[in-house]
Image: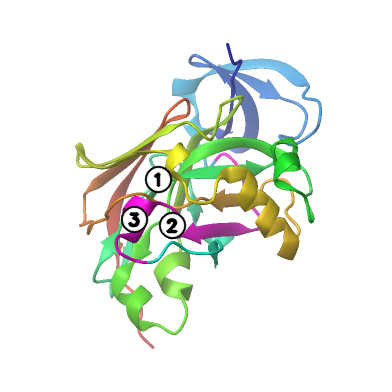
Amino acid sequence: MRVTKNFVRYRDTHTIHCGLLNDDIIAELSSELFDPQHTFSGRQLKLADVQLLAPCQPSKVIAVGLNYRSHIGNMQTPEYPGLFAKYPTCIIGNNAAIIMPDDAESLHYEGELVVVIGKEAKNITPAQAKDFIFGVTAGNDVSERHWQRNDMQWFRAKGSDTFGPIGPVITQGLNYNQLNLTTRLNGEIKQHANTSELIFDVDYLVSYISRYVTLVPGDVIFTGTPGRTSRMAIDDVVEVELEGVGTLRNSIERVALHVY
């Protein structure tokens, strides 16, 4: 039987801490989240009494496109992972609002397994990758399809503020190659798959990315979305459930842009 651990990042009054979650009790860490050995402050809090934040603050947000056969349709299976970058400012946590810019026309969900790096990784092999992975979490690679089709780059379409929800926890000890992934929009199941269906599995992705960029603790990798996606509207609620991790829940809100 696998032993799992769930780590959270949270705000308690005016301060931000990390902790180990057991049922609904958080044991506050006195060490840094990515330290090799964790130590605890002795303080315990109820989950209901704190505000959960994104479980880490990455320096890099890397994502993979076209990584499920159910998503690529009739397209040819890619020879290598199609990578793109999102931005650290896109990262939000559980129950935070996804902000739809006023000029957005077609905002879609993309439920995904997200890998969290725990140790500096450069030019590692797939066999070594598991030793550099801190854990996994659920994510939503929010995408504006009109911008994705028509902009020269995916700067807006994939990297806008709040377009990268992750959470609610980072879980260690799971077999990340065999996890069920489900996306619901307003309670209706829209996507369902297992991470065993990834074209490029987690270990290969971490190895491949490390050839080109140095991964550091806290960096995250969105591993791709299955099946079809559809448009989200204001006040919709999107949920991404990852087996063993829990459910990431976010609502959609609109914000007006100032045009200069």
In this rendering, position of residue 27 left or right of residue 51: right
In this rendering, position of residue 60 left or right of residue 25: right
Examine the structure image and report whether residue 242 is included in the region drawn in magenta. no
Residue receiving disc 1:
96
Residue nearest the observer in this picture, 92 or 63: 63
Residue 26: horizontal and vertical position, in percent?
A: 58, 19
Q: Is residue 243 above or below residue 227?
A: above
Give the image quarter of residue 32.
Answer: top right
Residue 71 numbered tag = 3
Region of the chain picked out in magenta, as a range: 55-75
- The residue that appears at 53% across and 51% down in the rendered structure is 200
Which residue appears farthest toward the bottom when viewing the image? 260
Examine the structure image and report whether residue 60 is included in the region drawn in magenta. yes
- The residue that appears at 58% across and 11% down in the rendered structure is 1
Residue receiving disc 2:
162
Q: Residues within 10 Å of mark 1 (few under 14, many from 20)?
A: many
- Cα–Cα gap, marks 3 and 1: 27 Å
Location of the C terminus (image quadrant) = bottom left
Q: Are marks 2 and 1 in contact (CB under 8 Å)?
A: yes
- The residue that appears at 72% across and 54% down in the rendered structure is 215
